[in-house]
Amino acid sequence: MDRISNLPDELLVKILSFVPTKEAVSTSVLSKRWEYLWIWSPNLEFGHRVCSEDRCKRLQSFLDRNLPLHRAPVIESFRLESCSSHFKPESIKMWVSTAVSHCLRELDILHDDTDPAKSKNILPSNLFACKSLVILKLVGEILLDVPNMISLPSLKTLKIKRVRYSSEETLQRLLSNCPVLEDLMVDLHDYDDYTTGKLTVAVPSLQSLSLYIPYISLIDGFVIDTPALKYFKLLDHCPYDHYFLIEKMPFLAEAYLDVSLTDLKSIFGSITSVKRLSICSEAVMLDEGFVFNQLEHLEVCICTLFSSADQLIDLLKASSKLKRLDISFMDLHKPSGMVCWNEPTTVPECILSSLQSFSWSKYTGEPEERDVVVYILKHARHLRTSTIKSSESSGVPKCEMLKELELSPRASATCELMFE
């Protein structure tokens, strides 16, 4: 320990910046040499999601007393997990305000509450004028009240999940004052009054967007105008019809769509440049002649095949350059029976000329699923690998599934059939 203590302060602070804040603070009891070193650490992390009232009160007292003494000229990251009712909102405001005054670069707050109706405004006004802030993450029962005077010139990443908004204009006001924003995630809150209005995401600089609209939502509609977008994830589980407008995304490379919308034509028309598409929808309808002219990797959720297996063929017909096709269940989706499969009279061009990889996850071996797999094996001339992953709940023995598929005709003599 003496040898370490002889190192320069700058090096010791650097070492402390790589350990959890709790451990960094604990070094203060080692000797006078270490007593105040932690207050120079640029990375601070406090709190715990599951925290007793007594423990939270001790932490609040510690932060009230020590955080104003912090000496780091730049705080790289300030993370706080709070179990709400145990922390006073005015104390959290003061802690965040202190961090902001040290040229804060990343703020990450998780604020849980047993009573969601009591969302607290725990964000100080100086946060919305922080010129150094690059990353802002807010999760939980936080009331987001953005002042009229706001400027976040360095903010590149914004992730807000389950927060509540003071008005319909709050989010738009925030976004319009983030001129270099690149990565945005917005997860709306169930039953939030804000969602009775229209949500607008109009950010010219945005490259990645993830938007979640919950099942229990009264949203009127949403508008997305993000011409530089490269990654787009839309989870729209609201079962009620609502207005939406998605402007062209000419640079989009990857899209993930899990939606309950009844008409996806306008969405498809905005993402024609996509190279990888993951989709779950029971309303795939494509206009005659529509094409995904750059699509190489298509992942289709089996839910998409429930209402009509023709939807898969429509997607394949629109994807003439497709190289990889995966059929699986997307996040948290549950298996269900497929409808009858009627083999189409024509074969999509991609199956004949470009498809090289095919996989099916949670394969049950039921006749409808088997017929789809056999159809692809029968016509895919350039297929190199075909991977079938059986479902644990399948009523068909694995050996029977494998035998059926091994005996089926294959257009590609070099196709390797793998069964897992």
Image (cartoon, rainbow, N blue to C red):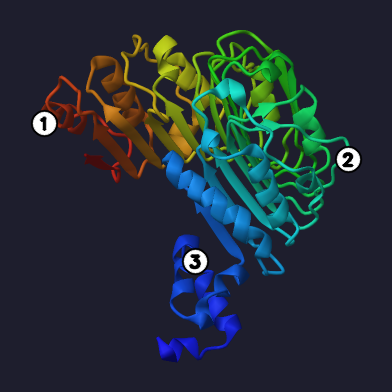
Counting from the top left corner in percent of width and height, residue 239 is at: 55, 10
- Picture quarter with the C terminus: top left
Identify the disc placed on residue 377: none
Residue 279 % position (x, y) = 51, 27
Which residue, given by chain and number where applicable, does mark 3 sit on? 25
Residue pointed to by mark 2: 149
Mark 2 residue type: Met
Residue 176 in the image, given as x and y percentages of width and height: 83, 38
Provide the residue designation for mark 1: 399
Asked if one can make out residue 264 in the rendered structure from this viewpoint, the answer is: yes
Q: Secondary structure at mark 3?
A: helix
Q: Residue at x 52, y 30 (%)?
A: 113
- What amino acid is at disc 1? Cys
Say which residue appears at 44% left-offset and 33% top-offset.
352
Lower sequence index among marks 3 and 2: 3
Q: Quadrant of the N terminus?
A: bottom left
Q: Nearer the viewer, residue 112 or 244?
A: 112
Please tell me whether mark 1 sits on a helix, a strand or a loop: helix
State the CA–CA distance, disc 1 to disc 3: 59 Å
Q: Amino acid at mark 3?
A: Val
The quarter of the displayed image where residue 372 is located:
top left
Q: How far apart are labels 1 and 2 at the CA level? A: 67 Å
